[in-house]
Image: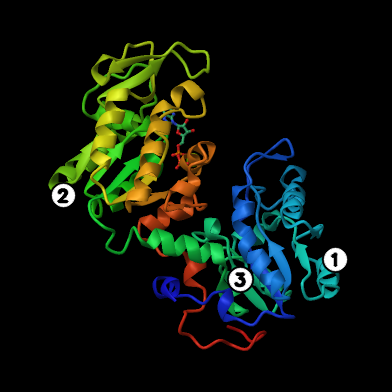
Amino acid sequence: MKAAATFGKKTIRDVDVAGKRVFLRADLNVPIDDGRITDDTRIRASLPTIVHLLERDAIVILASHLGRPKGKVSDALRLKPVADRLSQLLGRPVRMTGDALGPGVQVAVDKLRPGDLLMLENLRFHAAEEDNDATFAESLAGLADIYVNDAFGSAHRAHASTEGITHHLPAVAGLLLEREVTALSKLLHRPPRPFHTVIGGAKVSGKLEVLEALLSRCQAILVGGGMANTFLAAKGMELGKSLVEDEQLANAERIMAEARRKRVRLMLPSDVVIAPQIHHRAQKRVVRVTEVPKDQMVVDIGPDTVTAYTEHLAKARTIFWNGPMGVFEIGSFAEGTNAIARFIAGRTADGVITIVGGGDSVAAVEKLHLARKMTHVSTGGGASLEFVEGKTLPGVEALLDADAPLPAAGDAA
Ligand code: ADP
Ligand code: MG
């Protein structure tokens, strides 16, 4: 199979799961506002693996983290709303345990029959999860015969449920994790050229490493969002009240110098949308980047920049996009982001590889209903960026290699 060739790890298709207890680590870490799920993308993305395992008569023990409870029980971060949504999507009840581990969990697991699904409470209520505590990992493993990792969004962290547990069970990939790795690998292994990246979002600081990695792989980097302000400021532009990271000016200069040396085209906005404040009723105006008044701030890229960027992107055979071009959460400041999203989506039909990664850029694409028009929209957030940087993800690394012999279920892997 073609996917397996680039993926290199065993998947659920390679193991006999009928009647076996499967510990399924998914990433069901969805945004929840006042008990309501505001975006269920990650739950829906986890469905294929869950359904596949249930249809093959596995006993599925589903585990995830939610938010950052920092090792303490937090009622606001219980997985109940996730179980409810999952239950709607599956069309069957989803039972939950009151804890991720403990005597109650064991009793509930012992009652399960082939084709049953049980969801554990938030793993991160235990500090041992993020500490990758060996005893905790072994106890989680003790619940099951086989381990499946489908939590691509958590694969860049070596936690008990993503790494430690693989030392005790045969460990294979779920379908989402396989799809993510296979799709994002297209950016690492000889992507069709020219390969152009559009990068934005709030800050340079969170994205230095990905910028550096892309400099050695892309032919052009088109910068937008708050991040562009810091580059413009490094070139001496006065940007009024705009978000500028003063402590990143030197890094921005260094990246621009490196781009020149490597002959990578680094494009910055020529015009911008400005407003006196970030507010949906704020009066906006388009100006050249050299003309931002002291009492205004940059909130989006301007129309000339959109034209210049899309004209340049039209030549690309591979496009990676991370980070919105402006404060897209406010409709009137979202025009630049939306125009870039529509343009990239339109290129897919011409055979261009179009990949979007990053929580907010993905949200922007979803909002426009353009996800289906991209080659791949990653659910990974930080994990996708680390993957694109060329880092190995501990949660992927720990899985059985595609050509490794399969230990009998229950044997230590
Ligand atoms: P992603 O999640 O796609 O990686 P980031 O988290 O880096 O993206 O950045 C997203 C945030 O950047 C959004 O909340 C957006 O409002 C903000 N942002 C974009 N442009 C600007 C700007 N000019 N000024 C302030 N914030 C901005
Ligand atoms: Mg973000």
CA gap between label 1 and label 2 equals 59 Å
The residue beneath circle 2 is 262
Mark 3: which amino acid?
Val
Within-10-Å neighbours for mark 2: few <14, some 14–19, many 20+? some
Q: Is 171 situated left or right of 106 in this image? A: left
CA gap between label 2 and label 3 equals 41 Å
CA gap between label 3 and label 1 equals 22 Å
Image point (59%, 55%), residue name: 45
Q: Upstream in the sequence, badge 1 or badge 2?
A: 1
Q: Nearer the viewer, residue 147 or 238?
A: 147
Q: How many marks?
A: 3
Q: Is residue 92 above or below residue 356?
A: below
The residue beneath circle 3 is 148
Mark 2: which amino acid?
Lys
Position in image of residue 84 (x %, y %): 77, 50
Q: Is residue 148 above or below residue 350?
A: below
Q: Is 188 situated left or right of 58 in this image? A: left
Q: Upstream in the sequence, badge 2 or badge 3?
A: 3
The circle on residue 104 is: 1
Circle 2: element type: loop
